[in-house]
Amino acid sequence: MMSDKTTTNNSAEPGSGTATGMLKEDALKGKTIIITGGGTGLGKAMGTYFLKLGANLVITSRKLDVLQQTAAAMESATGGKVLPIACDVRKYDEVESMLKQSVEVFGRVDSLVNNAAGNFISPTERLSANAFSAVIDIVLKGSANCSLALGKYWISEKIAGNILNIITTYAFTGSAYVVPSACAKGGVLAMTRSLAVEWGRHGIRTNAIAPGPFPTKGAWERLLPGEIAEKFDFKNRVPLKRVGEHQELANLAAFLVSGFAGYINGEVITIDGGQWLQGAGQFNALEMIPAEMWDSIEKATRSA
């Protein structure tokens, strides 16, 4: 499974930004992979590695300009082919259109990574019904829409596709202050295990990754604005005393969508440095935040 051209610097300090790709260079050659929320952050990191392994890539989100910029940068860095498609995963007709365009360009689609997400921290009693629905619709409904469209396509075309859902560790523990996200991700976890059983007979695998803290500049600044980021240092709640490197998550994702993981189905793999074992509920410690600070957090979140 290791590439002859890939070396590992065993002397480097863990978490020092030295993580390297783990699969051989043609591990995903000829495969077409859709990543929702693929224009930024972890979606971009996974997609870039998929391209390096020979895959064709479709990236989607609601912001076409961001997708086009990312696609150009990815193609320049890897020499691969990227198709950016604006798609609101909450709307099934847009998902079907996105799939149709993908097939028209690449001939077929082999894998789906449900990565699109929305989240914010807040005491639950401060949330409106619309705020709750906004997260549920993107995370749970969006993942369901994409899984349903791809599943119908694969079964009809007799393609042994696979789905990889990006959830969270609090999908199975719950967490205070991110209740809409916990509910939505918990639903995606249940869908992962359910479809693994139901669609397995079609050769369709369904798995999930539950990441711990893998900070991305834009998303994490919106999630933990201002001084709260200083007060709530994730490294202190991870036994390894560091956050994850994007390449580490990309390595795991690439393995799970590749043929090397052909007998892994219905599995949820945690990659969090042991964080949830040390203290379940990723955001439970936010109980220390006083009410007046929540006011400033809410103001910063709304402006973002």
Image (cartoon, rainbow, N blue to C red):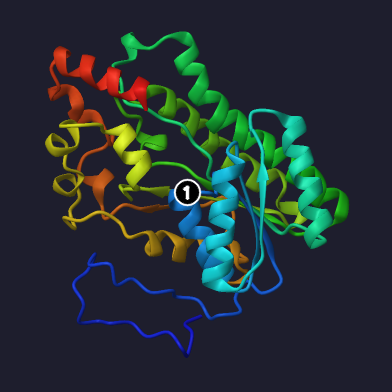
Which residue appears at 53% of the width and 45% of the height? 115
Q: Is residue 256 visible?
A: no
How many residues crowd around disc 1 within 10 Å: few (fewer than 14), some, or many (20 or more)? some
Q: Is residue 134 visible?
A: yes
Closer to the camera, 20 or 78?
78
Relative horizontal placement of residue 9, taking residue 111 as reference (left or right):
left
Relative horizontal placement of residue 143, taking residue 225 as reference (left or right):
right
Residue 139 location (% of width, % of height): 53, 32
Residue 254 location (% of width, % of height): 53, 65
Which residue was labeled with disc 1?
40
Which residue appears at 19% of the width and 37% of the height? 229
Closer to the camera, 38 or 149?
38
Report the residue that reaches farthest toward the right. 156
Is 201 drawn above or below residue 219 in the view shown? below
Is 235 drawn above or below residue 24 in the view shown? above
Is 289 drawn above or below residue 54 in the view shown? above
Which part of the image, by quadrant, shows the C terminus?
Answer: top left
The amino acid sitting under disc 1 is Thr
